[in-house]
Image (spheres, rainbow, N blue to C red):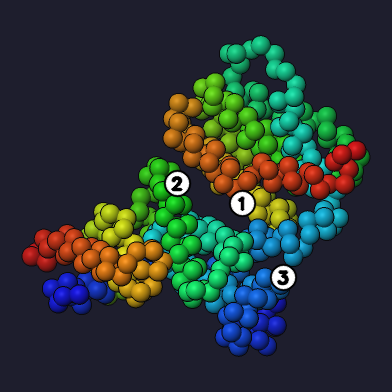
Amino acid sequence: MHDHDELDDTTRAALRAYRTPPEPPLDEMWRAIEARAFGAHAAPRRQFWRAAPTWLAAAAALAIGVGIGRYAVPAPPEPATPVAPRVAEAPDRLGATATVLSDARLDVPYEVATSRYLGATAALLIALPAEARTGQVDAQFASQARDLLQTTRLLLDSPAGDDPDLRALLSDLELVLAQVAGLRSARDRQELDLITGALEQRDVLPRLQSVVAQIPFAGD
Amino acid sequence: MERTAIALEPAGALDEPVRIERVLAGDPRAARELYDAHAPRVYRLIFRLAGDADLAQELTQETFVRAFSRLRDFRGDSALSTWLHRIAVSVALNGMRKVKRFREREAPLEHAESIGARPSGIDPDLRERLARAIDALPESLRVTLVMHDVEGYTHGEISAALEVPEGTCKTRLSAARAKIRQALAPFRKE
């Protein structure tokens, strides 16, 4: 390095002040890392579900059930149907399942909220690629995502966020929903690719499916 | 949290290869020790590159998740920190590219930057001009400058992390500094 490459003292000091980092949230980061990197090995997921409350297992099963239902049940030929009402039907479907959840003594408000939230979120995310292909993703779809994003953040701060596995899942859903909420048009292929890429990169839907596969009553 | 155990067996008490073996054998405490030894520096670098606390947190987590999942592939040819930083830089640059479009619609850099601590004693105008000049650098020059002149990495460390020859690092640093000097020239004349 030649002398003329050197910077003066003032510039060097200013360089060192470029984007001065805050204290790293080491414990918070570790909890997320531990859940993702060692959850499947150090603490077998089966143990997690054995310990998990029934409402959580039911919620996860519901999440996939709603999503699969959207594909398994042929949709009526309504090409002009707006997106939002179809997304909004998830809570209605959940109404039927709510009876089952009540039977499981699911009477704590945030547990009900989590169940409904997971169902609606799964429906929205599973529907996204199909909506994108038909070019029907619109502002209402993004609005639905914004509502779910708010719920995600509330749940992260609720007792539901105390469980490391659920917290990791909620954190990933927060990231994806934030992207969907910012969606402007289904014709913005690059943006949609980023979102579907995030879904794939974070294995969001496979993780939900994996969770359901480990629920004892899922196959009953 | 196993703070007591960590205090009884402080970081550095065991050789890193031993700790790695323990992690591979399924010892979560060893994993935490490795993390504690390297996470602060990894986070600092990623924050300097990303300029956003939430993003830096996410990318740091991703770095360690990948590192632990691939730890069995670490052959010890280089220091673990070198290997980790290679992952960190790759994760950070890829992650930043992916969120760039969203970031452009959200808070401008100045707002994101304000999350970090603001050191005193530096002319705010110089600081702002310098930040803009760094942000305007091509990625390869910016990463090299940030690693060397901001975070104090050696050319050897940068070379290993970026997987380029040391000579390339030096050339990039020289080019980055020239651009910074050029960008600050009008400011110096004022």
Tell me: residue B119, above or below residue B10.
above
Tell me the residue that label 3 is attached to.
B26
Q: Please report whichever mark, 2 or 3, sits nearer to the chain's N-terminal start.
A: 3
Q: Position of residue A79 (x, y in %)?
A: 60, 13
In front: label 2 or label 3? 3
Tell me: residue B118, above or below residue A143.
below
Measure the C-alpha gap from mark 2 to mark 3. 33 Å
Give the residue at x 61% y 86%: B14
Of residues B154 and A166, the one drawn nearer to the viewer in this rendering: B154
Tell me the residue that label 1 is attached to.
A171
Chain that bears disc 2: B
Kind of residue at disc 3: Gly
Q: Position of residue A182 (x, y in %)?
A: 48, 37
Is A129 on the left or on the right of A116, as rendered? Answer: left
Looking at the rendered structure, the secondary structure element under dot 3 is: loop
Looking at the rendered structure, the secondary structure element under dot 1 is: helix
Q: Are marks 1 and 3 on the same chain?
A: no
Give the residue at x 41% y 58%: B50
Of residues B163 and B132, the one drawn nearer to the viewer in this rendering: B163
In front: label 2 or label 1? 2
Q: Please say if the residues under marks 1 and 3 sit with CB atoms less than 8 Å apart.
A: no
Give the residue at x 66% y 64%: A34
In the rendered image, is residue A174 in sight? no
Tell me the residue that label 2 is attached to.
B98
Chain that bears disc 3: B
Measure the C-alpha gap from mark 1 to mark 3. 25 Å
Q: Please say if the residues under marks 2 and 3 sit with CB atoms less than 8 Å apart.
A: no
Measure the C-alpha gap from mark 2 to mark 1. 17 Å
Chain that bears disc 1: A
